[in-house]
Image (tube, grey):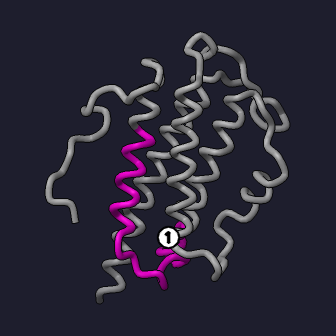
Amino acid sequence: MTTTKQPEYWMRGPIENIPALLQPVAHALLQARDEINEMMRNFPPELLWEKPAGNASVAFHLQHLTGVLDRLFTYAKAEQLDQQQLDYLVAEGKEDSAINTAMLLENFNKQVDLSLKQLSSTNENTLTGFRGVGRKQLPSTVVGLLFHAAEHTMRHTGQLLVTVKVLKQNNNR
């Protein structure tokens, strides 16, 4: 357990190599990564696929966090999803005994790193550029997609936090 708690990322100053207008996205992704890795420390592996009160499992949230970052950042690059990404989407939340917490965290951490790398190479002049989302090419912008990636990540981080706490508490009874 950490003995010295640092301030949240948005209070630590700019993230090196990230454009100024994209700092909030980077801060949210780094904050989520810190909180998720901390909350998953010593998580009982037998609870990974449990769905308390019918809600999404811890495994689903970890899979979805990784997948949604990959998908939204792909759209931000004006690319469409490939078959591997579509297959990943279909598999999110489907119980698989070969999947473990360490694997899910490693995948999420790598995806955050890839997202930060993409942010660092995103030209601020492109932020208001149109981006079509999905097969229907629903309208968005680069900044809209990147902001949604950050807020969606934080939404699932909060849901994951509650799910982990409930499962741990119920497991200790």
Q: Work out which quarter of the rendered image holds the C terminus and state it.
A: bottom left
Residue segment shown in magenta? 28-57
Residue nearest the observer in this picture, 96 or 121: 121
Task: Point out the residue furthest to the front here.
Answer: 17
At label 1, the amino acid type is Ala
- Near mark 1 (Cα within 10 A), the count class, few <14, some 14-19 or many ≥20, is few
Task: Point out the residue furthest to the left here.
Answer: 3
Residue at 52% x, 44% y is: 113
Instruction: Decide whether the magenta segment is chiefly helix, strand or loop.
Output: helix
Q: In the rendering, at what x and y percent does residue 123 appear? A: 59, 16
Would residue 46 be found to the left or right of residue 162 on screen?
right
Question: Is 39 part of what is drawn in magenta?
Answer: yes
Q: In the rendering, at what x and y percent does residue 166 appear? A: 36, 73
Number of marks in the rendered image: 1
Identify the image quadrant of residue 170: bottom left
Residue at 48% x, 74% y is: 53
Q: In the rendering, at what x and y percent does residue 3 appear? A: 15, 59
Judge whether 165 appears above or below 90 on screen: below
Would residue 59 be found to the left or right of residue 73 on screen?
left
Judge whether 133 appears above or below 31 on screen: above
Residue nearest the observer in this picture, 1 or 51: 1
Would residue 112 be found to the left or right of residue 70 on screen?
left
Residue at 25% x, 32% y is: 11
Judge whether 6 appears above or below 25 on screen: below
**Residue position marked by numbered label 1 in the rendering:** 102
